Amino acid sequence: METINLKVEQYEGPLDLLLALISKHKIDIFDIPISEICDQYIAYLDAMRKMDMEVTSEFVVMAADLMLIKSKMLLPRTEDSEDPRAPLVDALLEHQRAKAAAEFLRIQSAGHFDTFTKLPSEPEKSDYSRGHAVELLAEAFSRIADRIVSRKDMVEPELFKRIEDRYYTVEEKTADIMKFMESKRICVFDDLFASIRSRGEAVALFMALLELVRDGFIDVERNGEDIELSYAEGNENAERMARIDEYQ
């Protein structure tokens, strides 16, 4: 897929942006190359941020969701398992239908009666750092994944030809991360992956980290060459402690 070349403008929501990317690159909506579309989406948000355009929380959440789907695509799937892209495809198709219906009604009503426009609701404010966090995590995980693949190719290539004996869940890795961060309070991204022994474990850990960052439990920022993770301020209040207990 070519480098992003869309006019930087505000879209009504993340699904509109995704549909614009899909249309621009003539992508089959039923077979979305999730890695490429994810990179394009994140690059677009970064362009918006650099131009001081508002990036609302719904765009940030979609970026995290795309990274989750991208991660799930790395895992082996059985014939009966659902394509990780399926919910996204359904949402895009439904959004297309809704837009088409709205346009049809607009055209039909244009010559018959006055239209009344609902004032737009106040957009939910979103800290740019959350959107930037997704970009940093994507960059760091790409580096970690390449390292794991290279190590397996050198030492034990047959690992790619079999299903891993140990299955790691996102819930399990979420609890591991919270315990680790409660004791460390701050660490670099690579520290979390220091003891990873398989691609499946790396993907589960990364998916858990994305969810924790998206929910505001972990903060992310660049510190020189490192991607730094920190235990978010406010995690000790009663409401947050209750949610943390759910993870553990």
Image (cartoon, rainbow, N blue to C red):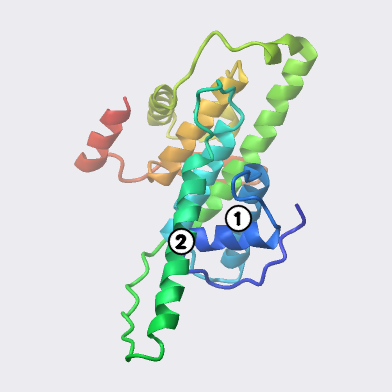
Q: Is residue 118 left or right of residue 89?
A: left
The residue singled out by tag 1 in the image is 41
Q: Please, is residue 146 above or below residue 20 in the view?
A: above
Residue beneath the point at 38% across and 25% down: 175
**Residue 34 x %, y %:** 62, 44
Q: Please, is residue 125 above or below residue 94 in the view?
A: below
**Residue 110 x %, y %:** 41, 87
Residue beneath the point at 27% across and 36% down: 243
Question: Disc 1 residue type?
Answer: Tyr
Q: Is residue 242 left or right of residue 44?
A: left
Q: Is residue 38 left or right of residue 149?
A: left
Of tags 2 and 1, which is closer to the observer?
2
Q: Badge 2 local density, few (<14 within 10 Å), some, or many (20+)?
A: few
Question: Disc 2 residue type?
Answer: Arg
Quarter occupied by residue 164: top right
Q: In the rendered image, which quarter contains the C terminus?
A: top left
The residue singled out by tag 2 in the image is 97
